[in-house]
Amino acid sequence: MLIFDDDNRNGAQLTLSEANGLVRDAVEMALPDAIWVQAEVLDIREKGHCYMELVEKDEVRNTPIAQARACCWNNTWREVKEKCEETCGNDVSAWRGLKMLFLLRANFHEAYGFSWIVEDIDPTYTIGEMARRRAEIIRRLKEEGIFDMQRELTISPFATRIAVISSASAAGYGDFCNQLAENDYGFAFETTLFPATMQGEQTSQSIIAALDAINAEEDRYDVVVIIRGGGSTADLAGFDTLELAENVANFPLPIITGIGHERDETVIDTIARVSVKTPTAVAAFLIDNLAATMETLANAALRIQRAVQQRLEKEKLKMEGMGRRIESSVAMYLMKQKHLLQMMEQRVQAVNPINILRRGYSIALHNGKAVMDAEALKEGDRLTLIAAKGQTSVEVIHN
């Protein structure tokens, strides 16, 4: 070990490269072997080799507390990248923000200073870290009492006005629209796209901005759909933020997710009103929802038709019964009235003057009126006598 005396600057002196060489030797002596290190990818670039900026952040304040450069040489990088692609995606720019487990070897170069050499990456750690972060967000949502708020919303049985959050160029968005347009029932859906970034660091804020735009005119829509195509597990990181989860949970319209990942479930999948795996599955859900409504209405119409038919049959039988009763009653009434008429006719015939005259009686008329009081007649009055057969004129003679 060299010891320098500040008061004796004329003693042993080192060049910068020699001093850096000492640092290199010290680093190699202190860390002779590669070590596994947890770190977040702050920046990453591919130029044959892969250059990274790694960071550790305070979990409470989310501010950096350690930062370092790292490099993975080309021959190692090809193997490491291929192993990590299924989990982290083949677009390494999307690795920014991921927590990963690196096998690092300390390296100090006289000309370039300190950096870590990446010898391996364990993708299973990233999966576990994402699962831990999801569990923590879900715990927070439950503490806030908003975890189940979307499930309390009702999807309209006539949901046809769809607000869609997706990348405009995503194949999944095209598949979704085509399936809705070409449904077997001929249903007409109205879709409005609210474009958003669906991958990378901007995903969460972009979707929140789209939700804000929909919320400003929520009366125009029945349901919100969040869809994207397939991708790696790491591509889902943008869907696993507390801020986005809180916005989804508190949103006033039902939200349906089709994130397009068969193996993993994001936080917003967990809290959405309905979660299916793919954009086409979302379209199928909406079509089936409307088809179920159509079937319900058809069944209701059939029940109404049957009820009306049964009521008509019942009323018909009732009217027929009433008709028969009325017919009998009328017949009896007519018979009774006929009998009364016959009796009245007999009584009328009994007092008919003609019949009386036929028994030998006659009627005396004076000035066209029947004589009721003989004392009222005077001698010489002319009377008309009406008999059963004919009439004659007589004169009153007093005895």
Image (cartoon, rainbow, N blue to C red):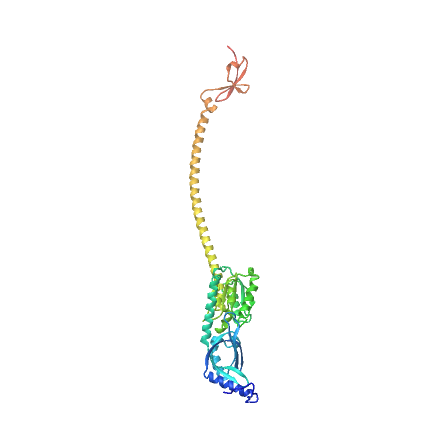
Residue 343 picture quarter: top left
User: For the image shown, how many numbered marks are present on the structure?
Assistant: 0
Q: Nearer the viewer, residue 42 or 267?
A: 42
Q: Nearer the viewer, residue 34 or 364?
A: 34
Q: Nearer the viewer, residue 40 or 107?
A: 107
Please state the horizontal and vertical placement of residue 129, each as a whole percent of the image. 46, 72
The answer, for residue 48, to whether it is visible in the render is no
- Position of 178 with respect to 342 (left or right) is right
- Position of 317 with respect to 198 (left or right) is left
Residue located 46% across and 65% down the image: 139
Residue located 48% across and 62% down the image: 144
Please state the horizontal and vertical placement of residue 257, each as a whole percent of the image. 49, 66
Please state the horizontal and vertical placement of residue 142, each as a whole percent of the image. 46, 63
- In the image, residue 43 sits, relative to residue 342, either above or below, namely below
Q: Nearer the viewer, residue 162 or 307?
A: 162
In this view, which residue lies farthest toward the top? 399
In this view, which residue lies farthest toward the front? 7
The answer, for residue 115, to whether it is visible in the render is yes
Please state the horizontal and vertical placement of residue 9, each as a whole percent of the image. 57, 87
